[in-house]
Image (cartoon, rainbow, N blue to C red):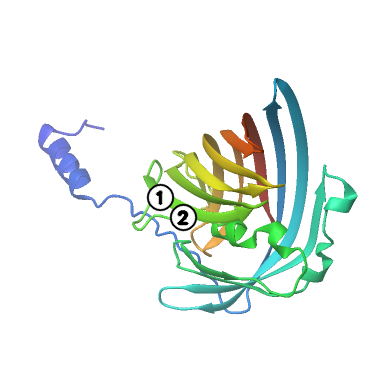
Amino acid sequence: MRPPTRSALAALLLLAAAAPPARGQLLRYDGRPGETRAYARTQTDHVTQTVNGTDQTLDLESYWRFSTTVQESGVDSVILAVVHDSIAISGVTVDSVPDFSALYGRLVTLVMGHRGDVRSVRPPTDVAGIERLDLETTYRTFFPTLPRDSVGPGTTWADTLVLNTSQNGLDIRVRRINRYRVAADAPRDGRLEVDYSTTLSLEGEGRQQGADVSLTGTGNGQGSFRFDPGSGEYLGSQETSDVRMDAFVSANGQNLLIPIVHRRTETIELLE
């Protein structure tokens, strides 16, 4: 067989150059009305605070199991019904953990855009102790933010999320910046693996046990999530983060600075 001539090689190169690139995939949260997905969320928190030179440590573990059902999928938004059937918290005294079973089976309505930008979280208002769960923050950060444009292996994007929350008498403002990158190797089943890093800053103030408290901190983390472009299905994630804070406490004419280190790991699984 004769080798191709120079002109034939040139023609092949021209054809290759003219061929359109592989098309990217547009990522959107979606689903048919009535479609239900169940998730398990496991979280561990290791907190160390130093008071007058002495370290005090707290370890918490929590496990949530819940389902999300598509109520409506419109042109620019998705409405989800979130229903919990299990919430377990360990690492604190039994007396300080509310009984959350009154929340089981109750509807939490979540309205978000197809990119994951949450517009409202509406929990039931008649469940005792529900403020301890901070459902507003939980579900504003549950779904990763997707890019506006199509993606392929190596695609990057970023988003900024600002959260205002109240915890243990403190009003806290958190600013979180996430930077995403689609894994270079596309899986054979068409599902995407996306790695990300996050940086955050926080500030807060309020009163605890009669003392004025102000709080500042910064942190960073890393994780990954999985997504099915074909079904618009969030498949789960893992994340580890570290936050360092300083709490300035003022009471009875005395001031105290308390350094705090908080390490968190979180795993979200799609239950199939």
135, 192: nearer the viewer: 135
Residue type at mark 2: give it. Answer: Thr
Can residue 271 be seen in the rendering of this structure? no
Q: Is residue 189 above or below residue 135?
A: above
Residue carrying label 1: 159
Residue 37: % across, % down: 66, 66
* Left or right: residue 147 compared with residue 119: left
Q: Position of residue 183 (x, y in %)?
A: 47, 40
Q: Which is more toward the observer, 8 or 234?
A: 234
**Mark sitting on residue 145:** 2
Amino acid, disc 1: Asp
Farthest residue to the front: give it. Answer: 253
| Observer-nearest of 191 and 240 | 240
User: Which quadrant, please, contains the N terminus?
Assistant: top left
Does the residue at mark 1 contact the one at mark 2 (Cβ under 8 Å)? yes
Q: Position of residue 50 (x, y in %)?
A: 68, 26
- The disc, 1 or 2, on the residue closer to the chain's N-terminal end is 2
Disc number placed over residue 150 in the picture, else none: none
Please identify the quarter of the rendering in which residue 70 is found.
Answer: bottom right
Q: Please, what secondary structure does the residue beneath circle 2 have?
A: loop
